[in-house]
Image: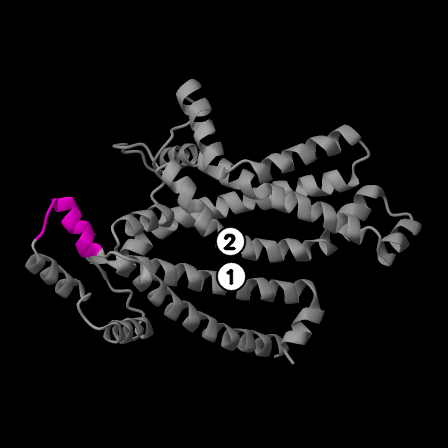
Amino acid sequence: MRGAKAAFWRLLQALPVALMVVVLNFFLLKAVPGDLADVIAGEAGAATPEFMAQLRAQFGDDQPLAAQFSGYLNRMLHFDLGWSFRYNQSVASLIFERLPATLLLMGLALSLAVALGTWLGVVSATTRRPWLQRGIGVLGTLGFALPAFWVGLMVVVLFTLKLGWFPSSGMNTMGSQASGLAYALDVLRHLAMPVGCLAFSYLALYLRLMHEAVRDVSTLDFVRTARAKGSSRRRLVWRHIVPNAWVPIVTLTGVQFGALLSGSVTLETVFAWPGLGQLALMAVQSRDVNLLLGLLFVTSLFVVLVNLLTEAVHGWLDPRIEQGAGR
């Protein structure tokens, strides 16, 4: 009952945030100069004022800002993301066509970053080998210092142009009729480089955070008690220290899930990955406001839901957080 009450209050707190996001998205995009009519006129080379006025009337950009905003709010209340005039397709269908590819890329990259980063953080905090600790520290520093797009370009040069091990673009081989296991293996080959680059960019954060968390937990009284009772080193680390060091990792994972959406824009462009990041870039280039508003709304809502899930996991890991939320 207490957990349900806490979840209800979290949901109530998230509603004003979602409304604020909807309002800010609209006015920020409307403040940007240029629209889809300008882009179409630029592609055509020239356009008469009458034709430009006709285009803006078709797109609804000739209406007063208040009327456009009320129409936008009405669509959002009915979960109608609008129509992309650039693609001549509903925004919802465009987003849900691209969403699986982005979730696949993000999910694998984040899982790899969390698993490797936390493991290396534990090793660096508990090892008695200085050379190993220094090597892990150098890896973490490189992860912080090297931009994801530069790493992406370098791995394309090495693993595609030089060695020919992995394809450099797309989600599967163009024109391939593979199915079943062959199709899955083909997708995995296309995933290898973008997932590796994205995971490498975020691995350093988990490595550093887990290193510090393990060091902090190691000084607590219950660890000293377990050590005094004769717990082995392995049991002490993995049974007592690591589970208690996981709370900040959960927090960072929730934050990074939202950040990955922005990070995927760069790497989806480098690797021509057919996800939301590449769709967002094309929407910006074509000034497709309806598509951009839909993308921002879906991704913002996704971030809010992930934050709610993160808080719920916190409550499960540490009941004191759940008790505080339920008051």
Q: Position of residue 136 (x, y in %)?
A: 68, 34
Task: Give, as a single range, the part of the protein colored magenta.
Answer: 36-47
Q: Position of residue 62 (x, y in %)?
A: 17, 67
* Residue 36 visible, this angle: yes
Q: Which residue is mark 1?
A: 306
Quadrant location of residue 72?
bottom left
Q: Quadrant of the N terminus?
A: bottom right
- Front residue of this view, candidates 243 and 201: 201
Q: Which residue is located at x 54 percent, y 52 percent?
A: 256
Q: Which residue is located at x 31 percent, y 33 percent?
A: 178
Label 1 to label 2, Cα distance in Å?
A: 8 Å
Q: Is residue 15 magenta?
A: no
Q: Position of residue 96 (x, y in %)?
A: 32, 55
Q: Secondary structure at mark 1?
A: helix
Quadrant location of residue 190?
top left
Relative to 222, 2 lies left or right:
left
Check disc 2 and give the amino acid type.
Phe
Say few, some or many: other residues with alpha carbon within 10 Å of mark 2 (under 14 / 14 to 19 / 20 or more): some
Note whether 246 is above or below 194 in the view shown. below
Q: Secondary structure at mark 2?
A: helix
Relative to 211, 109 lies left or right:
left
Check disc 1 and give the amino acid type.
Val
Q: Main secondary structure of the magenta part?
A: helix
Q: Quadrant of the C terminus?
A: bottom right
- Front residue of this view, candidates 283 and 304: 283
Q: Which residue is located at x 70 percent, y 30 percent?
A: 135
Q: Residue furthest top?
A: 162
Say few, some or many: other residues with alpha carbon within 10 Å of mark 1 (under 14 / 14 to 19 / 20 or more): some
Give yes or no for contact between labels 1 and 2 (Cβ–Cβ under 8 Å).
yes
* Residue 88 visible, this angle: no
Q: Which residue is mark 2?
A: 257
Q: Position of residue 281 (x, y in %)?
A: 33, 47
